[in-house]
Amino acid sequence: MWIGMADAASYPSSYKQLGFFYKPAVDQSKDTLVKYFDDYVLTRGDESYRDSLKARGISSPFLQYIRFDAIQDPGSCGSRPYHNQVADHYGDFCDISNNHADWFLLDKYGKRMYSDGYVMMDPGSSGWRSFFLSRIKTMQQSYGWSGVFLDNVEASLTKRRQLNQLPKKYTSDSSYQSAVKGMLSYLYSWFHSNGRPAFANIITLETPSVWFTYMSYLDGAMCEAWATGWGNSGWRTTSQWLENLSRAEDTQTKGKRAILVAQGSKSNNSRQQFGYASFLLIDNSKAIFRYGLADSYQYAWTYSNYTVDLGIPLGKRYQSGSNWCRDYSKGKVCVNPSAHTSSITQN
């Protein structure tokens, strides 16, 4: 059963929505930022920046970034932890470590899973779920956030395998997915009933159906390597590209939103246009696009094609030889997924 979008009226209904995240832009003024970007994810501590964007006319819900998968070990009980995760009070990590050891996700050797100063938590732990929701509720209500963006929602054990951190408790993708789904459902009950949108970055997706399983308990989700693949040189195969487009279309058809991030460097204009044109093929006013690199999200790159007025779509995408095209009232978009070429033309 699909639950309707919370707070849907606050989102723009226009086509060609651009998204910006997760920290304030370091290369653009606020006035420039709001001219290009419509939807935002920021982090606890960025409230003043957030409110200044609101004052400049941004009316879409501001989502609070939070780590879904882990908490930070700040190094000592007296060190201040980051606000990008729920254990953000002084002494939180020490308290959880000493009094709630069962909240941690342990590897097959019974050890905690560390990565870059963060420690994995067990999505199946009722105590952890309760603590997480309690903290995020307080943050949302006390600091004026509209909704939440949950980062690193794993859709398989792939990342655990890559880090040689297979969990002892979850020995299969399905068992791990069940625990993650259970936590999403637990959180969404509060967010949905309080009219607050809940989004997630769904990662390590091996089976597309898992995306939609999780989406039953979300208002939207991010695909962080959409259409182009990771980095600045690798590409999706044509079949992978087609799956990315179909999943984005189906997500919107179900009344959900899709944040679609095409990865690439700032100066790679042909790659940027390929990603943006791919987005224009499937945009039905519930998709959000960004072109950038994962380690450079603090830069708000802007491109001239973002301001090209194509009007509104006249129908769905269609195949024309090796190209996939879509007609707009004031132009046309075509993408060749095998040659990695694209065109955006006005009438």
Image (cartoon, rainbow, N blue to C red):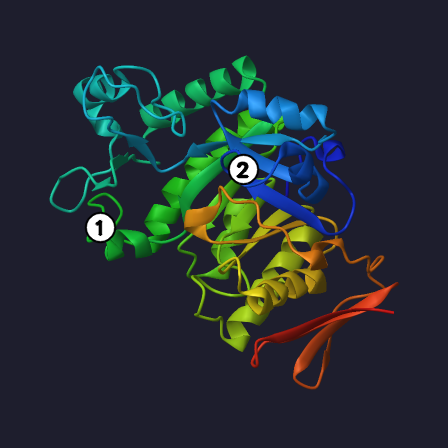
Disc 2 marks which amino acid? Answer: Ala
Q: CA distance from mark 2 to mark 1?
A: 36 Å
Q: Secondary structure at mark 2?
A: loop
Horizontal and vertical percent for residue 279? 66, 60
Horizontal and vertical percent for residue 252? 68, 52
Give residue 328's quadrant in the image: bottom right
Give residue 161's quadrant in the image: bottom left
Q: Nearer the viewer, residue 328 or 126?
A: 328
| Label 2: few (<14), some (14–19) or many (≥20) C-alpha neighbours in 10 Å | some
Q: Residue at x 52, y 33 (%)?
A: 24
Disc 1 marks which amino acid? Answer: Leu
Q: Residue at x 63, y 53 (%)?
A: 251
Number of callouts: 2
| Label 1: few (<14), some (14–19) or many (≥20) C-alpha neighbours in 10 Å | many
Write down the residue under mark 1.
166
The residue furthest bottom is 321
Horizontal and vertical percent for residue 102? 22, 28
Q: Residue at x 61, y 40 (%)?
A: 219
Q: Is residue 308 left or right of residue 252?
A: right
Q: Nearer the viewer, residue 148 or 2?
A: 148
Q: Nearer the viewer, residue 12 or 303?
A: 303
Q: Residue at x 15, y 47 (%)?
A: 108
Horizontal and vertical percent for residue 179? 37, 41
- Please say if 50 is above or below 254: above
Give residue 300's quadrant in the image: top right
Q: Quadrant of the N terminus?
A: top right
Write down the residue under mark 2.
25
Mark linked to residue 220: none
- Please say if 63 is above or below 55: below
